Image (spheres, helix red, strand yellow):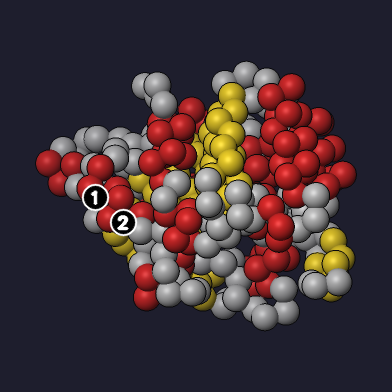
Amino acid sequence: MLNTWKLAIPELTGDEPRRAYVYLPDSILADPDLRYPVLYMFDGHNVFYDEDATYGKSWGMLEYLDYTQTQIIVAAVECNHDPDNGRLSEYSPFSFNTRETGYVRGQGKKTMDWFVHTFKPEIDENYPTLPDRKHTFIAGSSMGGLMSLYALMRYNRWFSRAAALSPSLWVAEEKVEQMIRTARIRSDTVLYMDYGSREFGNHSDMRRRFGDAAALLMERGVKLTCRIVPGGTHSEESWERQLPFFMETLLYELD
């Protein structure tokens, strides 16, 4: 069962509407007293419906959840589509400047503050959630993958588990490293992180950056599931095939 509606994020784009999606397991129809973990996701328009997806292909999350009968709520919000680096700005914790993008002002903190102080309370109030940290997760890909890592490191008070698919670690390598080194994270923190084998040529030295980040996360005690996806590409089609892997990590031995 999937609900959709329009909302605004005044802190970022004023009254401009964007779509929100909330998936509920069908089991709630049989027992309205049930409560569920919640997975928050970035790029909500790419998560459920091909017709909403930027490139005409979604993650197929709706079909996966219905087929597996996974007992979880998924709450996802559309990104900023402003052609002037709107998505990059909202989905980066750090400001950066590259030849390809030009200067990008990182507004990731504003984005995450909205998630934890506005969106999460709204979801908890209106849906049958388990609102505690243990049952609250976050996931995304590319810049959304970087944001998921950021959320787990800097907003660990709210999120116990995350999935960062093809995270954009190229954005600001030294700042990402500092973020991981200085994060206040609890011992039960869980992370799934992957990268497609065919992605490594997209950014210079990406294989080393990915390995360094993984090693540092393990050094900090994060319960890390880390994969190099054979033949994996930077696309929704590839990320869809990783659904069983990262969902298993998020829900592994969860009470």
Q: Is residue 118 above or below residue 130?
A: below
Image quadrant assignment for residue 22: bottom left
The crowding category of the residue bearing disc 2, from other C-alpha atoms within 10 Å (few below 14, some 14 to 19, many at least 20), is some
Q: Which residue is mark 1?
A: 66
Which quadrant of the rendered structure holds the C terminus? top left
For the residue labelled by badge 2, is the local secondary structure a helix, a strand or a loop?
Answer: helix
Q: Amino acid at mark 2?
A: Leu
Q: Amino acid at mark 1?
A: Asp
Q: Is residue 206 above or below residue 236?
A: above
Residue at 36% in and 67% down: 49
Q: Is residue 216 visible?
A: yes
The crowding category of the residue bearing disc 1, from other C-alpha atoms within 10 Å (few below 14, some 14 to 19, many at least 20), is some
Q: Which residue is mark 2?
A: 62
Residue at 40% in and 21% down: 253
Where residue 122 appears, as percent x and y from the top left, is 45, 52
Which residue occupies the extreme bottom position in the image? 83
Taking depth in this image into account, of 16 and 92 the one nearest to the observer is: 92
Q: Is residue 230 left or right of residue 180?
A: left
Where residue 175 appears, as percent x and y from the top left, is 84, 45
Residue at 62% in and 32% down: 157
Residue at 72% in and 73% down: 85
Q: Is residue 145 visible?
A: no
Q: Is residue 101 left or right of residue 74?
A: right
